[in-house]
Amino acid sequence: MLTYKDNASESIVDIAFQETLELLDWATLCSQIATFSSTAQGKEKCLNLPIPTDIATSRSYLQETLEMGELDKLIEGGLSFQGIHDLEKILLFCIKGGFVSGEELLQVAETLRSARRLRRQISDFQIRPTLSSLLVELSTLPELQTLLESSLEEGGRIADRASTELSRLRRQLQGLKEERSDILQDLLKRYSPILQDIVIAERYERPVLCLKANAVDQCEGTVHGSSSSGNTFFVEPQQVISLGNRIAEFKIKILQEEQRLLAVWSAEVAVNAVTIRHLCGTMLRLELALTKARYGHWVGGLPPVLTEEEDSPFVIEKFRHPLLIWQQCYEGGDSVIPIGFNVSQNLKVIAITGPNTGGKTVALKSMGLAILMARSGLLLPCSGAPSLPWCSQVFADIGDEQSLQQNLSTFSGHIKRISRILDALTITSGPVVVLLDEVGAGTDPTEGSALAIALLQRLADRARLTVATTHFGELKALKYNDIRFENASVAFDSETIKPTYHLQWGIPGRSNALSIAKRLGLDSFVIDRASELIEPKGVEDVNSIIKGLEEQRNLQQAAAEDAAALLGRTELLHEELLNQWKKQRQKSQEFQDRGRQDLESSIREGQKEVRDLIKRLREPSADGEIARRTGKRLKQIQVAQKKETIIDRKGWSPKIGERVRVISINKTGEVLEISEDGIDITILCGVFRSTVQVTSIESLDGQKSLRQLPKIKVSSNTKQVSKVEVRTKKNTIDVRGLRVHEAEAVIEEKLRHTAGPLWVIHGIGTGKLKQGLLQWLSTVDYIEKVTGASQNDGGAGCSVIWLK
């Protein structure tokens, strides 16, 4: 009995929730999100978008979406999941002991290779901790991939190198085919007078000659048929029949050997089925995160903040219904009017009133979709900073014509669905949101309004939030007797007889039936008589009170707009003053930069001249006179350098975590590490890291760091100064991940401040980066040579640059 009861309870919740998804058009939203996926399995997964059952999973999904979105923007062309296949059917077949085709095995190999590429692009615990944690235990089985790719050719054909026996059989088969072809060519020449066509045709995988009908007896062989006219007979000559039989035998042997190899490889796939299935599941989850990110970027979405407190407020500003956004972009629909929700922690029930076609149901569905999207890790198409409590369930009873799948529009249908919702509330833990459309409608207005009041009061005790649309005036007064209730209405312009679709909080909707009827030309006698029949309750009519509230709200709105305009003018004035200040500061900075650049240019010219003088002294033809003139010139350079004035001023200094600009490549990055002497800075630019000197960077507003200008020391001793030939952190630079021109700029900047050899880590990879750097270095006149690093210093992945 307990098991039956538990199953029945779960069934009630599932039925109520599935009905809610249908009423909110969740499947339509999923189908639209699926268009942003790139693989068939990704699209299928999006059509059944998973909705987490706990807040931790929802937060994890949202973080995955954000991290994937940021990475997708950094990579040129975006992340690609091409090459990831759905291997579930292949794995099931292999596990059961069957063997799959070569083409299907190539899909396994391609999936493993693509997964390894994606892991290399995504994994970075400092930048993408959530995504990287998914890849920790991911194995891409490189041995299996190598086995399959080396044994199979494009299209799934088994390569000759797959086995010695297969290679031998295919060579023998090819020899027999060539022998038979030679014999057939000789027969074509011999029987050319009696041939209907000088070609070697094929019937039932046997070569035949096309003989004329009256010459069949002149060629011994087996007749395999004739043409439809009967003028041509297809005869396999006797001379090649035995060869044909042997060829057929070899084909069978080759097929058996191929099937044996496929069975061996399929068994290997079956052994690793658990690992491959985990890999496919991880790739599918990553693609789902990428799809959500791209969809969120398309709708201009923002990440919601999910709170664990059940009574947390709902704050969603200018939410645009995602299905209406799609309709506007692809189906020529009207512009989407945003709706805002600001529900305080004390509110439990919101009654939305107003005329038909005014947007009440759209507001209701927008609320439900916003909650489900946040729960599923999607970005919300809204503005501001959306925040809402994590809701364990959303139940809805929407019985309008806006959903094609709605088929319970009668009063009894509404009651059945509401009964299921109440039953589900008794067994559901956590915050629950209930959405009711036209509550109490479809029956006598007096009984319907009484039933609606009782129902909303009951839901106020059991649900976190209930949003209900209604036409009953009695529901508008609940707010004044219970602080848990609030009114809202959709605005209506009685002058144009059109709704504005704006949701107004705190003001109930007033009846516009008589004004609409009058505008539409209904007989004035009927309208006057109807007005007489309406008896006001109390001092003023309810509609007059509501009208006064609306006028007051409009006055407040106008005042707020005037204040906003004044604030805007103030901000423009502040921005103008700020721009003038920045221009003055920029001019001062440019003046200082020009002076510094002139000083640096003078130093570089002096360094170049010193190197030329030292090179001249080292020449075998150098005599005493050359040494005397060289020494005199060196003293002149030394005196000139001492006259340079070093500007000592307070300036900007980089800090860990700060974003700076690398001057040489004009890219921004984040400071990860600063050396003890403050000279070497480790920066993360995009997806690669690089260590540069502090003089090679600047702040985002153009400020340079303090640095001591290099001083040239000239010694009269003509002996060569020994260079440091030991690799250290200061004479090593990592350019992996950079393009060739970017690496050239970074290396050139490093060489300006290096006296000895420079170790450049470029990696092995495809070799294009290394080849491009070697070609460029061969054209630099102050480079003496470029050698490969020792095995302990990087081997083939590192080169050493020696200065002259």
Image (cartoon, rainbow, N blue to C red):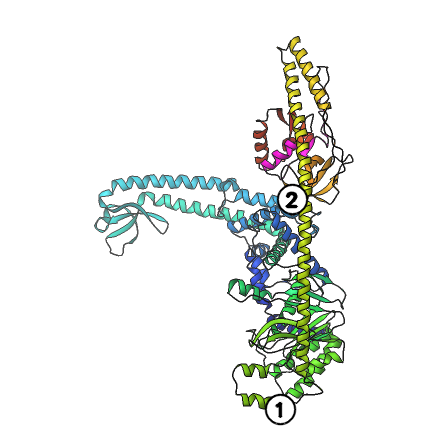
Q: Quadrant of residue 395?
A: bottom right
| Residue 694 sits inside the magenta stretch | no
For residue 467, above or below residue 529: above
Mark 2 secondary-structure assignment: loop
Pick whichever, 416 or 521, lies toward us: 521
Query: Which range of residues does the magenta coloring cover?
Result: 723-749
Residue type, mark 2 in image: Val
Q: Quadrant of the N terminus?
A: bottom right
The residue that disc 2 covers is: 687
Decide if residue 527 is on the left or right side of residue 535: left
Residue drawn at x 27%, y 51% as measured from the top left: 233
> Which one is earlier in the sequence, the residue at label 1 or at label 2?
1
| Residue 731 sits inside the magenta stretch | yes
Q: Disc 1 vs disc 2: which is toward the camera?
A: 1
Label number found at residue 397: none
Residue drawn at x 23%, y 53% as measured from the top left: 231
Residue type, mark 1 in image: Leu
